[in-house]
Image (tube, grey):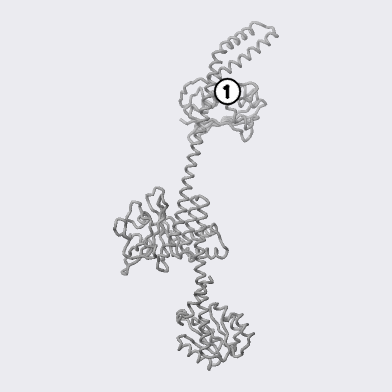
Amino acid sequence: MVMTSVAGFQQHVSLSLEQLLQPGEIVVIVDDDPAIREPVRDFFAMAGLPAEESGTAAGLMNRLAERKVALVLLDIGLPDTDGVTLLPQLVEKDPDLAVVMLTGVADLEVALECMRKGATDYISKPAGLEQIFHVARKALEKRRLILENRKYQEELEEAHFRLRLLHQLSLKMNSVYLSTVELDEILRAVLVGITAHEGLGFNRAFLAMFDDQLRELRGHMATGPGCREEAGQIWGEMREREMDFSQIISNSREDCRRGDTAVNGIVRRLTVAATERENLLIRAVESRRSILVGPENGGVPILLAKNWANGKANGNGVQLPEGEPLPVPHQLIEILGEDTFVVVPLYSPGRAFGVIVADNYVTRRPITSVHVSALELFASQASMAIEQSHLYREMQHKISELEATYEELNRSKDLLVEAERYSALGQMAAQLVHTIRNPITSIGGVSRILAKKTSDESWLKYINVITKETARLESTLTDLYDFVSQDKVEKRPVMLCGLVKKTILLLQHELTRQLIAWNVICPEGGVTANVDERQMRQVFLHLVKNSIEAMPEGGELTLEVAEEEGMAVIRIRDTGAGMASSQVERVRDPFFTTKTYGTGMGLTLVEKIVEAHGGRFALKTAKSGGMEATVKVPLQ
């Protein structure tokens, strides 16, 4: 910055007076003595410096209100006010105003006070006209230098903010993958950077993207005049508060949406089939180069061929690789309502994403190669964001596929282990059935015969034990046989409510003996399902018996039949003691039981029958205590 200031000073020392003043600016000489101010005014005029004069502070204020004043030669002693008192008011009113103080007393303290209050320079009267002119010229040169330094500073700050946004975008995309929501936030931040005054300063920016199948280019989002003011506020806040990237996109998200009604209506009309290869937007993506459209002298839109490497653009029309000129679609011009715009493609090495279209619809500012090159930087960041989002989505899809494959492998492994276990169990059960069934039957039959032939109580006691235990063994063998047998499921329509009630009647004696109240809940009209009636009765018998055994001191048994999502659902709830969750997980394993006496085959058999019907069996702890068994089978 120091080097720029020095260079600027050296350049403007020899500037003409016209270069020191902006169009319409003048110099005002304020002195109560006409013999001083009039000769100075005439001398300035002859030197080419437009000047006016006034004898009072009030006259000066009128000049400031009516004219563009660059320099004031201000006498300290005025009839209506003191120049030293007036000086701070002038500086506050216009900080860019140059003020040279005039005084008839050569007092160093007064000069220092004037300089402290904002005076540009100080002249002691009497002074020659050339001396006054020289001081005035130096004051104007200093003012011009200050204004240009401020302009350079603003340009540097704008460039700094553009680079900062691009840097933040790069950090965001280098550190994480982008979901769809994050992608839209970044793309909106890019459009804000393109349209904000502190960014590229375009009036409008439109983003069009290909669909997932690359069949159509569709308008996605836009920013325009209604949002440009909001974008400027965001950049102003960023400058004041040193906002980071996340704060920028957070602030721009809602503000811009409220102001973008018009441009979003336009961008929704931007729809081009990917097969329209001669279309300007499609060809920009396919050729992977920016295209600048501008009006000819006659107002007919033409294409400006891109040659940004040496900063030039020609109006001879873009030459395609095939050597044919590329036409400008009139439909596109009608949609945009603008005949001068730039199209920048969005792409990665492996795929095309879409385009950014930008114009100066409001200000009509010419679009130069510098603007297009800067726009391409923002487009590259947008392309990177879209590529990261695609990678994220592909990664999520692969993760889902791997998780599904892993779950399928686990299910297959469990089925294989279960099949091996059931195969071993079947072999063992078959051996037990064939090896010990006949002897056990014989022992049971003989014990029952002996019980009938003797009346001796001591002998009957032992004989009854033999009879009871052989009956248990016969029941175990029956369960094993039922489990391993491959009985074919013979389905037919069965009214489940009636089947449940018949099951209850079979166990009515045990329910009454153990003081268990029971209730069957069925919908009006009942529920019909295609099931094997014998096997399903066996299921209900096992489940109800389990509930009865869980309530030795009495309780309540509820059987509910319903239809849910195309399935017949039977729920059996009891108020027994229930069981621990660890036991619930194992209760359907063969030979696992919580009873003192029992085979542990009942629930295993229940699950096997239900699955053979294409249904599902579940067991859980009921909310009111006890257990709840749920059987689901397909409806008729």
Taking the view exactly as shown, the residue that stands out farthest to the top is 453
Residue 75 in view (yes/no):
yes
Residue found 48% across the figure and 34% down from its top: 566
Q: Quadrant of residue 365?
A: bottom left
| Above or below for 368 versus 459 | below
Residue 523 in view (yes/no):
no
| Above or below for 354 versus 618 | below
**Number of numbered discs present?**
1
Residue situated in front as seen by the camera: 59 or 19: 19
Q: Quadrant of the C terminus?
A: top left
The x, y position of residue 373, in whole percent, is 42, 62
Residue found 52% across the figure and 78% down from its top: 143
The x, y position of residue 552, in whole percent, is 66, 25
Q: Which residue is mark 1?
A: 601
Q: Amino acid at mark 1?
A: Met
Residue situated in front as seen by the camera: 251 or 285: 285
Q: Quadrant of residue 109?
A: bottom right
Residue situated in front as seen by the camera: 299 or 144: 144
The x, y position of residue 436, in whole percent, is 57, 13
